[in-house]
Image: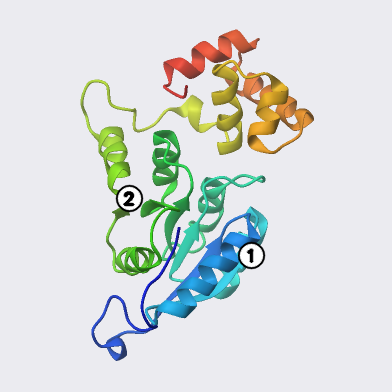
């Protein structure tokens, strides 16, 4: 994961003086991962420069506004709302900032949700350091970048053909990323305690999310929720 090779220098351009380093902001709720990415990028390339980092949605919104990065490397799942919430709060104020999702998840619904929210690309954390640098520079230049198997999800989601995922589902869009996580596991038959263990949250928090989902979907029990989730291919 994020392993570099060779000496520090320009990975993307032959003459680094032809362009300034891309300013990058890291958003991930795991401090050790952020530290590893920062150290790795700082040690192998002059093409990007990490200008800040955050471990929560609130910290990310404030940090991005303060540092004005060109590219934000954005985790998809965080305890207080996740990448889609960061996008929702930042893009109206800073429309020129480009977001590249960097996540452990390769689930189609995660990819589609963050792209709908406005991210320019999506790569998984198995990416090498050099490939990550190339991805950052490419999205800063206006390209869309995806890990190979993820591009198909996006094509399917936005293709006008039978069986493709809908471009917009107003009911599904009401749910936060964490509520979708809880709903997905609930629909798979997980007990509340198992969901809590899987998502590293408390049982009380699971109950709160389920109550919120029931309220938003206007359904009355987990069996109706399971059917609702299955109809939307969340399971």
Q: Nearer the viewer, residue 57 or 173?
A: 57
Q: Nearer the viewer, residue 122 or 30?
A: 30
Q: Quadrant of the N terminus?
A: bottom left
Q: Is residue 86 visible?
A: yes
Which residue is painted at 32% across and 67% down in the image? 134
Which residue is painted at 35% across and 84% down in the image? 9
Which residue is tagged 2? Answer: 147
Give the vertical position of 217 relative to 103 (above or below). Answer: above
Question: What residue occupies the far front of the structure in this picture?
Answer: 6
Which residue is tagged 1? Answer: 62
Q: Is residue 117 left or right of residue 19?
A: right
Question: What residue occupies the far right of the structure in this picture?
Answer: 204
The reply to whether dot 1 and dot 2 touch (C-beta < 8 Å) is: no
Answer with the quarter of the image where residue 192 lies: top right
Q: Disc number at residue 46?
A: none
Give the vertical position of 150 relative to 130 (above or below). Answer: above
* Neighbour tally class for label 1: few under 14, some 14-19, many 20 plus, Cα within 10 Å: few
Q: Nearer the viewer, residue 1 or 231?
A: 1
* Neighbour tally class for label 2: few under 14, some 14-19, many 20 plus, Cα within 10 Å: some
Question: Percent from the top left, x then y, of residue 93?
Answer: 52, 61
Q: CA distance from mark 1 to mark 2?
A: 29 Å
Question: Percent from the top left, x then y, of residue 53?
Answer: 59, 67
């Amino acid at each position: 994961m994020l392993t570099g090779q060779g000496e520090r220098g320009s990975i993307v351009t032959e003459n680094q003086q032809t362009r300034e380093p891309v300013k990058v902001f890291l958003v991930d709720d795991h401090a050790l991962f952020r530290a590893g990415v920062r150290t790795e990028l700082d040690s192998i390339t002059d093409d990007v420069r990490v200008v800040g980092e955050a471990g929560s949605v609130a910290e990310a919104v404030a940090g991005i506004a303060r540092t004005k990065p060109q590219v934000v490397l954005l985790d998809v799942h965080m305890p207080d709302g996740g990448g889609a919430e960061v996008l929702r709060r930042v893009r109206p104020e800073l429309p020129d900032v480009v977001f590249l999702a960097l996540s452990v998840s390769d689930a189609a619904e995660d990819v589609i949700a963050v792209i709908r929210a406005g991210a320019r690309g999506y790569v998984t954390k198995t990416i090498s350091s050099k490939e990550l640098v190339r991805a950052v520079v490419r999205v800063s230049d206006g390209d869309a970048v995806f890990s190979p198997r993820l591009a198909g999800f996006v094509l399917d989601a936005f293709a006008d053909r039978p069986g493709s995922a809908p471009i917009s589902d107003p009911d599904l869009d009401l749910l936060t990323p964490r509520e979708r996580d809880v709903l997905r596991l609930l629909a798979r038959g997980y007990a509340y305690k198992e969901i809590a263990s899987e998502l590293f949250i408390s049982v009380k928090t699971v109950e709160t999310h389920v109550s919120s989902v029931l309220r938003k979907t206007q359904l009355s029990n987990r069996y109706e929720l399971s059917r609702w989730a299955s109809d939307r291919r969340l399971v």
